[in-house]
Amino acid sequence: MDYLILGVAAFGAGLVDAVVGGGGLIQMPAIFSVFPNTAPATLIGTNKLASIFGTSVAAVSYARRVAVAWTVAAPAAFAALIFSFLGAYTVTKVSPDFLRTALPVVLLLVAIYTFAKKDLGSVHAPLHTGRKEQTLALIIGSAIGFYDGFFGPGTGSFLVFLFVRIFGFDFLSASAVSKIVNVACNFAALVWFGYSGHLLWQLGLMMAVCQIAGSVIGTGLAMKHGSGFVRKLFLIVVSVLIAKTGYDAYLRW
């Protein structure tokens, strides 16, 4: 029964994550509730193992069907790979609790801005080229990569928003690039957790299969319904993130 619950959660996480990110909202609470006595680092590592498969499949699916902006995706992913590992290392030295109260506020600002800008992400009109584009990609990859390794909630949604707002991508193209950067983040964190022995391989691989199934369906929905659908789901996921992180920060304790 435990494996069935986690399989369903992984499927849902893969579906949502493939479109706009935020699959951790489904998968992480499920794995922590099923294994409450297991070390948190082991559960986080197992979550990363499942997630990297789902995210990789989504990235490949997008790359085959969307014109991926590799001049942005490649430098952002490279920076994220390095800084996600640094973030995972830093969290073993410094508590991330100070981010807990700031996160719901930042997410709320993102939601308000997206609601207010009705045409945001509806048209793919890249704003930058050349060295400026690559520099901005490196900065975003470094910042979000470090955040993902250090803390993590909402990483995929932040990436989608930044690629839309800063680079002028539509939501579909932004989601495609964010998946590539997310793969780099997950890989770096997985290396750290694997090296430190915090992985439940059998459980993680079972959940990975379910994640892949969800990712295939989620990518198909995004491609079929386009940027308008992705924008709506983005706002729903960010709203749920605000509620969840706000509860954790201000009410739970």
Image (cartoon, rainbow, N blue to C red):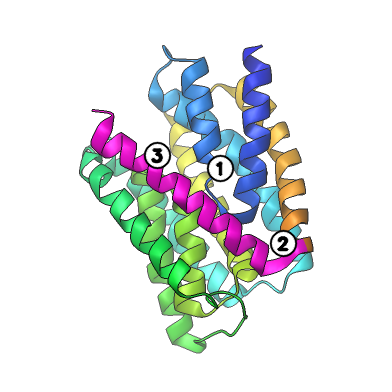
Q: Quadrant of the N terminus?
A: top right
Q: Main secondary structure of the magenta part?
A: helix
Q: Amino acid at mark 1?
A: Gly
Q: Amino acid at mark 2?
A: Tyr
Q: Which mark is residue 244?
A: 3
Q: Is mark 1 in CB contact (under 8 Å) with mark 2?
A: no
Give the left or right position of residue 57, taking residue 51 as reference: right
Instruction: Judge by depth and name the residue closer to the eye, 131 or 31.
Output: 31
Q: Earlier in the sequence, mark 1 or mark 2?
A: 1
Residue at 39% x, 64% y is 112
Q: Is residue 243 magenta?
A: yes
Q: Nearer the viewer, residue 227 or 125?
A: 227
Q: In whole angstroms, how far apart are the C-alphas of marks 3 and 1?
A: 13 Å
Name the spot of residue 245 as percent of width and height, x first: 35, 41
Q: Split into 4 quadrants, where in the image is the C terminus?
A: top left
- Magenta region, residue range: 225-253
Q: Is residue 220 visible?
A: yes
x and y percentages locating residue 121 in the rendered image: 56, 74
The quarter holding residue 249 reads top left
Residue under numbered circle 2: 62
Label 3 element class:
helix
Q: Is residue 32 above or below residue 132?
A: above
The disc label shown at residue 23, or none: 1
User: Helix, strand or loop at disc 1?
Assistant: loop
Q: Earlier in the sequence, mark 3 or mark 1?
A: 1
Question: Is residue 168 a member of the stretch shown in magenta?
Answer: no
Nearer to us of marks 2 and 3 is 3
Distance between the alpha carbons at the discs numbered 2 and 3: 29 Å
